[in-house]
Amino acid sequence: MSLNYIIKYKATNFYDNFVQEALWQFLIAPLDLGPQQLVYSEFKNSLNIPTETSVNGYGFTTYRVHPKTKFNKIEFEAEFHVLKEKYNPFENINQLSIEQENKILDSLEFKVHHSLFLKETALTKLPKHHTIHFTFSEQSSAFENLKNLNKWIFDTFSFKVNVTDVDTDLDIILEEKQGVCQDFTHLFCAVARSYKIPTRYVSGYLHQGNGYFGDSQMHAWTEAFIPDCGWIGFDPTNNLIAAENHIKVAHGKDYSDCPPIKGVIYAEGANRTEYSVDVHAQQNMQQ
């Protein structure tokens, strides 16, 4: 059985003064791979500027819009249809002994192969001024420790919007004990990497029909590489193992590798943006 998702994305930018030129890049198209199939995509803007499609350094599809005529308002709309197979994420958990697992994690070959997602970044740097009241147990497997980390973040921190931004470091998150999905994802990555677990930041969409917490625009969670299991998704915002409700767009070392939108605007004065994302799901009974 699969789920048929319809995702509608809309962003409207308003400017006090006319924009003379602009360049935007959008990273919002769902990944078309494995149990997740992108069957329809449409991206357009109110100025009818042609859209360029390219692939970023991690291999994910981006849309580029480069208007060269002046304007003070522009709307972007996208619609995606995604088929996603229902699956049990625990099926991939093949338990090695703890000794075997640690031997792999400690090996030079493993560290070199996964070095990109073991590195500390500005957004996943554990602060020196706050103690992390969570430790991996030497008597538990990597998967069990990561499940416990997922739950610890969920239990310790409160989901609250407008208290952080995309550049907020972990010092502030640990002090305030509040934030949104990107903050909790950065914290998960920081702790997991400190215990030699390769971890990547994932951006995408979340079907919130089951009462899950998520950002009003796009969601963030993690993928951790566990020896003999591969990449497993963890959502610390909701204390979930990522499955069919999580629709992946892209991944990177942290948020800075996969923001949904970035751009350059040539204009003076203030501006504001309104976003909306709607994720609707229905069951597809075809096998």
Image (tube, grey):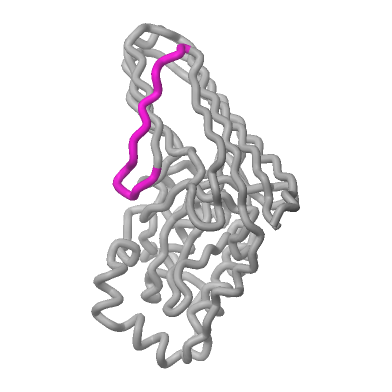
Write the residue at 32% across / 57% down.
121
Write the residue at 33% across / 50% down.
58
Relative to the observer, which residue lies in front, 52 or 114? 52
Q: Quadrant of residue 234?
A: bottom right
Q: Quadrant of residue 267?
A: top left
Q: Is residue 126 left or right of residue 140?
A: left
Residue 175 seen from this side: no
Please state, as top left, top right, bottom left or bottom right, where the C terminus lies in the image: bottom right
Q: Is residue 51 left or right of residue 28?
A: left
Residue 264, x across and y down, in percent: 33, 25
Q: Vertically, is 173 above or below 129?
A: above
Q: Residue furthest front?
A: 287
Q: Which residues are magenta?
A: 47-60
Task: Examine the structure image and report whether residue 48 is included in the region drawn in magenta.
Answer: yes
Q: Quadrant of residue 171?
A: bottom left
Residue 98, x across and y down, in percent: 46, 90
The rendered magenta stretch, by its main secondary structure, is classed as loop
Q: Vertically, is 38 above or below 252?
A: above
Write the residue at 53% across / 47% down.
204
Residue 25, x across and y down, in percent: 38, 31
Task: Examine the structure image and report whether residue 32 is included in the region drawn in magenta.
Answer: no
Residue 64, x across and y down, in percent: 37, 28
